[in-house]
Image (tube, rainbow, N blue to C red):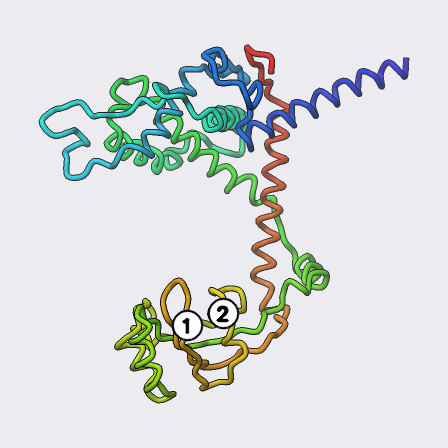
Amino acid sequence: MLNKKRLVFLVILVGCFVFGAYFWKIRHTGAFFWRSAENSTSADDMDFTVHVGDYLITREEVEWEYKLYMNQIETPEVVGQTEGQPVNGEKPDVLDPLVKKPNMELYNKILADLIERKLLYQFLESDQKFTLKEPSRYTACVQEWADASKRLPALVQNTKNSEHLKSMLCEKSILTQYVRDRVNPAVTVSEDDIHSYFNTHKAEFVEPARVVIRQIAIGNEDEAKKIRAKANVQNFAQLAKENSITPEAKQGGILGPFAKGEMPSVFDIAFEMSPGSIQGILKSTYGFHILMLEKKIPRFELSYEAAKPKITKDLTQKRQEEEYKKWVESALNTIPIKSSRAF
């Protein structure tokens, strides 16, 4: 009897793991309908329904969101036209992305996002401490819906599509608010947490040696030679303002501070120079450079107080991501997901 119970428990555990791993896969890779890397996509690959709790996701719904995404990329915003209408009453030329061979990776990513959105939205509806009926929660998404309707009129030309767009935008907005109001507040980072991280990761809080330089960059080598011949500490900044072709010329060619490796290799020589010395002419793909070292900033270790803001931010972000994953797992354990296809 005991062994039988263990077997049943093991089957359930494996089932939960497989489903969780599969959901993670479609969420992060978009790999949902691929049969193999070599096979081309057929119409059957896109023929499906997915039940997320009480909500039915159909192929048509995913296709609509796919078209919305693609047309946002491919259709320029309407400028200088009333209510987003084309000139002379002509119908807008909106490309149907599914006429071409669809990008299945993107298509499946949109499906995964839609499944997650419907899953989490249904799950948060059961939270009595989060008031969905509060009108202010919908102010931003309704405005976004109005703006999008003007920008892409062909995709909202009937009531069904218009309401679909509004629902999608408001669900996303509500989920963002829920994470902010109910998920993230569970995260705390104490002074002890920050101290512990600082003490065990001190190598992360070292500022490397850096330099501040001035440069004159010239496109022509002969001209660069003439400028180099007359450049000195006193006139270098003025020569940069008058002759350099780079944006920092207006500031007398000042660059930095920067560490070795943060700039193109032509600037590495600055770490071997002495303050006030001039080097050049140095050739790069950008032109011909004349460099003057302003100052060196030695390597130093950050104090706890200096490192604290970054540690706090990083730990908070990491713990918020962990809390979000727990929330998704709770939703997966509460709301069933069923598909018309066996994957």
As drawn, 243 above or below 1: below
Q: Taking 76 as reference, is 265 left or right? A: right
Image spot of residue 187 (x, y percent): 61, 47
Image spot of residue 49 (x, y percent): 50, 13
Q: Which mark is residue 238?
A: none
Q: Residue at x 53, y 73 (%)?
A: 210
Q: Taking 42 as reference, is 155 left or right? A: left
Q: Residue at x 38, y 31 (%)?
A: 169
Residue 261 visible, this angle: yes
- Which quadrant does the C terminus fall into? top right
As drawn, 285 above or below 301: above
The front one of 343 and 154 is 343
Q: Taking 280 as reference, is 182 left or right? A: right
Quarter of image, res 159: top left
In three-dimensional space, the C-alpha distance between marks 1 and 2, rounded to whole angstroms, equals: 8 Å
Q: Residue at x 33, y 72 (%)?
A: 221
Image spot of residue 273 (x, y percent): 51, 81
Quarter of image, res 3: top right
Image spot of residue 295 (x, y percent): 48, 81
Q: In what element is the residue under mark 1?
A: strand
The residue under label 2 is 258
The residue under label 1 is 255
